[in-house]
């Protein structure tokens, strides 16, 4: 297979922008007028090959022509494609801790104090999971934590006072 003429290779947008910048410099230096600048800039963005692009710079002193890539740059070796990873199924939020905290918090108001401790622990874990995005019931976990935190000192007070009256009395 024969190599194509480098001047007939297609140009990139980056190379067109570089030539347009050189035309702007020539306009600023007074080498071309505004009408010619407009005409050439339109031609730059219509140019498809290096030959068409470089013709627009050929009469401008100091202009740097767009250089086609070398043969090595033209044909990069094909990269092996990695197999696509299977899409992950969306993970359902795990709301057990928050729900458990709320239930234990409600039970702790009317029942024995171990439910208060469980409500506090489950509430803290549920809030942590909600903050990490693993659960969507932060409010339930927070309510359980608050109920457990309020009922725990009440139950401790009842136990202490009960024991004082029972054995002290």
Image (tube, rainbow, N blue to C red):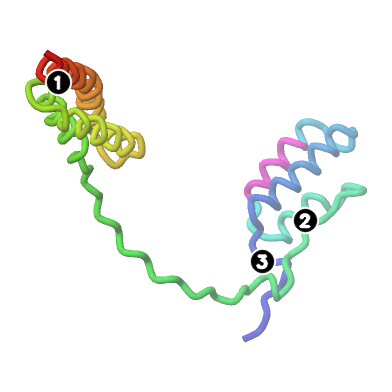
Q: Please give the residue where the numbered disc 1 appears in the rendered image.
A: 163
Residue 161 horizontal/vertical position (percent): 16, 15
N-terminal of the two: label 3 or label 1? 3
- The quarter of the picture where residue 53 lies is bottom right
Q: Is residue 4 above or below residue 91?
A: below
- Disc nearest the viewer among 2 and 1: 1
Q: Which label sits in the foreground, 3 or 1?
A: 1
Observer able to see residue 158: no
| Span of residues in magenta | 37-46
Residue 9 covered by magenta stretch: no
Q: Residue furthest left?
A: 110
Locate the C terminus and report the quarter of the image it occupies. top left
Q: Note whether residue 69 is visible.
A: yes
Residue 141 left/right relative to 59: left
Quarter occupied by residue 107: top left
Q: Nearer the viewer, residue 146 or 155?
A: 155
By secondary structure, the bulk of the magenta-drawn segment is best described as helix
SS assignment at label 3: loop
Position above or below: 50 against 133 = below
Q: Residues within 10 Å of mark 3 (few under 14, many from 20)?
A: some
Mark 3 and mark 2 lie on one chain; the one further toward the N terminus is 3
Q: In the rendering, at what x and y percent does residue 105 appear?
A: 16, 26
* Mark 3 and mark 1: Cα distance apart in space: 96 Å
């Amino acid at each position: 297979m024969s190599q194509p003429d480098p001047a007939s290779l297609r140009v990139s947008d980056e190379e067109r922008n570089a030539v347009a910048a050189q035309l702007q410099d020539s306009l600023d230096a007074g080498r071309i007028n505004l009408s010619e600048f407009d005409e050439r800039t339109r031609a730059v963005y219509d140019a498809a090959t290096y030959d068409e692009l470089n013709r627009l710079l050929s009469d401008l002193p100091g202009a740097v022509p767009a250089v086609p890539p070398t043969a090595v740059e033209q044909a990069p070796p094909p990269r092996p494609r990695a197999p696509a990873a299977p899409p992950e199924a969306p993970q359902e939020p795990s709301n057990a801790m928050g729900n458990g905290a709320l239930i234990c918090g409600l039970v702790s108001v009317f029942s024995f104090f171990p439910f208060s401790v469980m409500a506090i622990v489950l509430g803290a874990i549920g809030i942590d999971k909600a903050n990490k995005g693993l659960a969507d019931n932060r409010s339930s976990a927070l309510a359980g934590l608050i109920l457990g935190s309020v009922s725990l000192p009440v139950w401790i007070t009842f136990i202490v006072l009960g024991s004082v009256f029972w054995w002290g009395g």
